[in-house]
Image: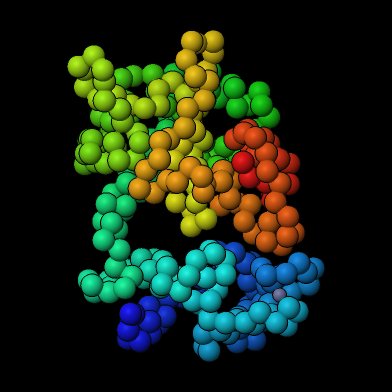
Amino acid sequence: MITDEIKEEVKLAADLVEVISDRVKLKRSGNGFTGLCPFHNEKSPSFHVSPHLGIYKCFGCGRAGDVYSFVMEQEGVDFLEAVRLLANRYNIIIPEGNAIDDPNRHEREGVFHALKFATAFFHQHLRESDEAKEARAYLIKRGLKREFIKDYLLGYSPESWRGLADAAKSAGISDEYLFKAGLLKESDTGRDPYDTFRNRVMFPVINTMGRVIAFGGRLMGDVKAAKYINSPQTLVYNKSEALYGINIAKNEIRKQEEAIMVEGYMDVLQLHQAGIKNVVS
Ligand code: ZN
C-alpha cells in the first residue's frame, strides 16, 4: 500500500518540466512547453507539457500522462519505483513500513555511494595523474575524444595496493562498503585487503537511472594477468541484466525500435562517439 497523501506529496514536490527536460529539449510556448516527442520519432515538435496542469500530451502519437507515467515509461519501472525515484530526487522522506520502503535500501545506498566515489576517484586519476599517461594514450589511440571521455566518466585505477581504499577511507567510506561494491578484495597473503582494480583503464557501467552499478577494467601493456576484469555480482549489480551503454542508448533504442548488441566497452564507445547511439554491450 502506498497512501494517497504520499502520492500527492511527491507529485507536488516533483517538477514535471525538470523531469521531462532530462529527456526532451523543451521550449517555452504559451503557458506551457513543447519539444520533440520521446515516445515516437518526429522532426517537428508535437509533444506538449502543461506545468500548471501537471500533464504532458503528444499530439502525434497520443501518449499522455503525469510525472509518474513519464518516469514509468522512460525508466521502464513500475509505479512504486517511480514514486521512490521521485521521492529520492526531491528529498521527500517516505515513512517506514510503507510499501516502497525497501529493507535493503540503506545498504544499497551505501554501495551506490561507494561506487560513485570510486567513479570520481578513477576519473580524476585518468585526467590528472602522471601514472595514467599510458591509459590516456590508449584511449586517444582508440579514437576517443577528450570531451567524450569526460561524458562517459572513463577512469584509471592507480597501481598501488590500496589507492582507492585509502582515499575512500579519508572520505568516510568504510572497507565494508567497498567490499559490498566489489571494489576491495581479501588478500591471501595476510596483507590488508586490496583494491580490486589496479593499473587499469576503468569503464563505469551505468544503469538506466544514471547510477554507476559496476566497473570493467582493462589492463595496460603486456602483463600476465586477465586483460579485462569486471565487478562481481553485488546488491546493485546483476551481471545477467546489466547492459553497458544503456544509460545513453535507451532513448535511441526506443525511438528506432532496434538495439545493436556489440561485444566490448570500446565498441560501444566508438559507435556512440560516431553518432550511432542505439548500441549496447
Ligand atoms: Zn509522440
Quarter the N terminus occupies? bottom left
Residue lying furthest front in this view? Answer: 240
Quarter the C terminus occupies? top right
Res. 111 in view: yes
Q: What residue do we see at 42% from left, 46% from top?
A: 237
Count of numbered marks:
0
| Residue 104 spot, x, y in % from top left | 28, 56
Q: Is residue 98 left or right of residue 17?
A: left
Q: Is residue 211 left or right of residue 196?
A: right
Name the one closer to the observer, 148 or 2.
2
Quarter of the figure with residue 42? bottom right
| Residue 183 spot, x, y in % from top left | 35, 34
Residue lying furthest right in this view? Answer: 43
The colouring scheme, among rainbow, by chain, secondary structure or one colour, is rainbow
Res. 120 in view: no
| Residue 61 spot, x, y in % from top left | 73, 78
257 to 147, vertically: above or below:
below
Q: Is residue 186 left or right of residue 40?
A: left
